[in-house]
Amino acid sequence: MERRTYLGSLGAASVTGLAGLAGCLDDAMGTVGLGDDSDTVLSPPDQTRGDPSHPIHGEAFPDFAIPDPIADETVSLEDFIGDRALLITFFFTSCPDGACPALLTRLRRVQEDARENGYEDDIALLAYTFDPERDTPDVLEEYGIEQSVDYEADNWHFLRPESYEEGEQWLMEDFGMGVERVEDEDEDADDSEQDHDGEDDDHDGHNGDDAEGDNHDSHNGDEHDNHDHGEYTFNHINLVVLANNQGITERAYPLAGPLSERDDLGGDIGVIVDDARTVAQNQPDE
């Protein structure tokens, strides 16, 4: 789509830090926008800002076919057409703060609500990792257990592309979400010093001291911090997207991280749960 052409300049702009990507969210990607509402359950959102590159209300959800390593199957958009609504978010398990666990919490709360209100079979919950190198099938399965995912409900899928490059291509070119892998310079410096003096400095893999304060919304005390952060991290927005069973986007929540003060843009879990229930229980006809 033409509205996604700005993504080609993301790498050239050399986004530095997640705070910079947050600026892209406001200035370039915009937030929730208005599309055609003729094929949607939900009315157009009240607020619009900018022209987001990711799908918005009334627009077709991009086609995909991505492996679910836990179920040992390939999950595609076609699997849900005429059958289920879908709610998707994007994360990596080595996230150095509480943003990614907060995104999965929103999906998990929808899963709980679906069980309580009888629409378990009417919605699919998709958690897409853009870090397949570290997010192996075993890591993803254990992470789901940590996040209290109910695998027996048969409506949760961890999506794991074959490689970061392959995942990045779909995210940026087809879906329209900016993501950037950032090497951890502090880790590189530690490795270099170790090569010189043989001593192993204590380093936890965070992307510098500013990572928690300036990048995602800060979150303290989350068990997710027990994960090894490795030698790189990612710049990304905290995005959740809801689509109906015809593959039409109902809502995009681009500020769905923890402690968000923008409830109208997805900070409120209750909003996402209510919207997901409404769409799942009132599916549009083909």
Image (spheres, rainbow, N blue to C red):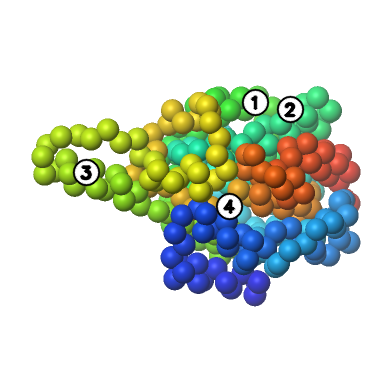
Asked if one can make out residue 42 in the rendered structure from this viewpoint, the answer is: yes
Mark 4 element type: loop
Whether pointer 3 and pointer 4 mark residues with C-beta atoms closer than 8 Å, the reply is no
Whether pointer 3 and pointer 1 mark residues with C-beta atoms closer than 8 Å, the reply is no
* Residue highlighted by disc 3: 191
Residue 5 located left or right of residue 249: left
* Residue found at x 50% / y 38%: 97
Q: Nearer the viewer, mark 2 or mark 4?
A: 4
Q: Nearer the viewer, mark 3 or mark 1?
A: 3
Mark 2 element type: helix
3D distance between C-alphas at marks 3 and 1: 40 Å
* Residue highlighted by disc 4: 237
Q: Nearer the viewer, mark 1 or mark 4?
A: 4
Badge 1 density bin: few <14, some 14–19, many ≥20, Cα 10 Å: some
Whether pointer 1 and pointer 2 mark residues with C-beta atoms closer than 8 Å, the reply is yes
Q: Amino acid at mark 1?
A: Asp
3D distance between C-alphas at marks 1 and 2: 9 Å
Which numbered marker is on residue 241? none
* Residue highlighted by disc 2: 112
Residue 185 located left or right of residue 8: left
Residue 67 located left or right of residue 50: left
* Residue highlighted by disc 1: 150
Q: Going from the N terminus, do you reach mark 2 or mark 4 first?
A: 2
Q: Is residue 273 above or below residue 222?
A: below
Badge 4 density bin: few <14, some 14–19, many ≥20, Cα 10 Å: many
